[in-house]
Image (spheres, helix red, strand yellow):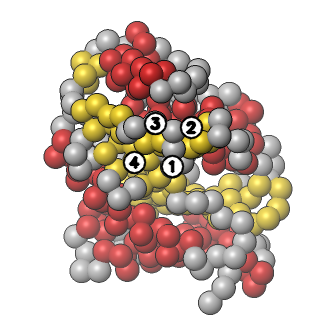
Amino acid sequence: MWTQILGKIRLKAMPWQNHSWHTALYISPRGLTTGAMPYGNGLFELELDFVDHRLRMISSFSPDRSFPLASMSVAEFYRRTMDILSDEGIRIEIHPRPNEVEDNIPFARNEHLSYYEAGRVLDFWQACISINNVFQEFRSGFIGKCSPVHFFWGSFDLAITRFSGRRAPQHPGIAPNIPKEVMQEAYSHEVSSAGFWPGSDDFPEPIFYSYCYPTPPDFKDQRILPEGAFWNDTLGEFLLPYDVVRKSEDPEGTLKEFLRSTYIAAAVTGSWDRNELERP
């Protein structure tokens, strides 16, 4: 929920970008950041610092502000964050409910105590750094349109998306508490997307995933590396358990195999012009 609040501030502060890229967060040297956002004649940035465990705001027009990250309700985090902005004259109003989750209690009314476990947060961030670095290298092999490596706070995943350059059939736009038009614009063009997801109560295992839209009938039948990767009919995606990567002799190489083989499966079955889209 904290990342949703920061993401919604970024959504309102940033100029619009295709596929909602202006809403995403980024892995930083200390945690998760909005990156620099324009306001008036200056810039400001919000960061969840997972080293010192603080919410930080830095700007070009005021002293740095922060407060400790600790166990607190979503409502308290929301109030503290918005107060920091308000105290520095930053007037931004966000849609005050979370998106892409079934239980979308308004932030200001979510008074349930949420536990902040610093050690687990640190582990998650350090894993994301390693994954981010592999994703950045994977991105460099593609000269077609490609997303940044970014963290989507609604689905809570670190993702990278390649585009064929062709329009896609209209997406059905099915996701909880998110406008259908947002989903349809996100999938307006053919994509091959991969990412890392830390799991949920319903799926309590961190995984890497890869899918394409639209999905050719023979996509799921392609040979995918490494051993341990598999197709999930329910999700309509190839999955690779995080532990398979973590425990391998070459974790980076193992993840690269998965990224490359699932992209090739999408490109081949989708008849992408690979000569125009890839570089050696």
Residue drawn at the location 35% of the way across and 59% of the way down: 29
Of labels 2 and 1, earlier in sequence is 2
Q: Earlier in the sequence, mark 1 or mark 3?
A: 1
Q: Position of residue 27 (x, y in %)?
A: 42, 55
Horizontally, is 19 left or right of 120 in the view? Answer: right
Say which amino acid is labelled 3. Ser
**Front residue of 272 and 182:** 182
Q: Is residue 156 visible?
A: no
Image point (35%, 76%), residue name: 252
Q: CA distance from mark 1 to mark 3?
A: 17 Å
Q: Is residue 223 above or below residue 46?
A: below
Q: Is residue 80 left or right of residue 106?
A: left
Disc 3 to disc 2, C-alpha distance: 18 Å
Dot label at residue 32:
4
Q: CA distance from mark 1 to mark 4?
A: 9 Å
Q: Cβ–Cβ below 8 Å for labels 2 and 1?
A: yes
* Disc 1 versus disc 3: nearer the observer: 3
Q: Earlier in the sequence, mark 3 or mark 2?
A: 2
Residue placed most toward the observer, 219 or 5 = 5
